[in-house]
Amino acid sequence: MLSKSNLRTPLARVRGLGSAKSGTGHFWVQRLTAVSNAVLTVVFLGVVISLVGKPYPAAVATLSYPPVSILMLLFILSATVHMRIGMQVIIEDYVHGLLKVIAVMANTFFAIAIGASCVFAVLKLSFGG
Amino acid sequence: MAEVKQAARPLSPHLQIYRWSWTMAMSIAHRATGCALYGGTLLVAFWLVAAASGPAAFETAQAIAGSWIGRIILFGYSFVLLHHMMGGLRHLVWDTGRGYDPTTRMNLAKYSVAVSGGLTLLLWAIVLATR
């Protein structure tokens, strides 16, 4: 009656993180952000559509309106987290060795750069500058 | 893992071997649209940064978005976004353990194209109607 699971320590079994030491973290966050994206993308599309062809003051007024700003910030956070994990899965499928490490890092930097730029822009519009 | 070597032995079949099916096409499309949206976030960032930079930069961004090539890109972007969303909702259904039988999964794949196409047209009808 000696199975693989019996060879794991009780602590390892309780933690449930497996050999990669991160468990189902990415899997879960990808589903979590998928659900939030489904809602926030509709908001984002609505905001963009309402601003099509609008002059600058009207665009600033919309984007700096607190509920819109907050939802835009949440959309940026949710979308960049989701796209980072998604692209990492693709990289891990097709790229191997040292190049994979570089690609995974570059992917993370890109997602953070996009997120930081968008968040800064929305905050600047909100708080004036 | 060892270095990848040129394998002489037969390898497992890849894309060109299989007959195309709706589920296979939509699986590939989900990954492709995800990649496209990844690049598309650059456009979102440019647009928001332009708005935060001032009237001149924003007018330029709006002019680019309003040009015919800008509109084609925006139309494509909206379709890709909605297609990826429908594909994602399909995955959420599968995550609950439902929708795996042959008829349902084929229908889900077909509907994801039809619904995302329909929603894109509806979206642009709203855009044109509210101008």
Image (tube, coloured by chain):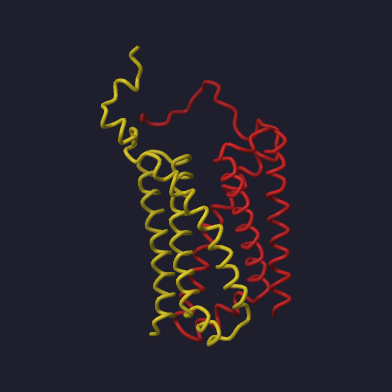
Chain colours: A yellow, B red
Q: Left of A44 or right of it: where is A84?
A: left
Front residue of A71/B33: it is: A71
Residue farthest along the top direction in this orientation? A1
Determine the residue positioned at 73% across, 70% down: B125
Front residue of B4/A8: it is: A8
Front residue of A34/B12: it is: A34
The number of numbered discs placed on residues in the rendered structure image is: 0
For the N terminus of chain B, give its image quadrant.
top left
Determine the residue positioned at 71% across, 57% down: B117
Vertical order, A128 against B106 (above or below): below
Vertical order, B87 against B72 (above or below): above
Determine the residue positioned at 59% across, 48% down: B30
Q: Left of B65 or right of it: where is A106?
A: left
Q: Where is residue B6 in the image (x, y as percent from the top left)?
A: 47, 28
Quarter of the image where one finds residue A120: bottom left
Q: Left of A17 or right of it: where is A66?
A: right
Quarter of the image where one finds residue A16: top left
For the C terminus of chain B, give its image quadrant.
bottom right
Vertical order, A94 against A69 (above or below): above
Q: Position of residue B58 (x, y in %)?
A: 52, 81
Vertical order, A62 against B26 (above or below): below
Quarter of the image where one finds residue A111: bottom left
Q: Left of A77 or right of it: where is A59?
A: right
Q: Position of residue B71 (x, y in %)?
A: 66, 70
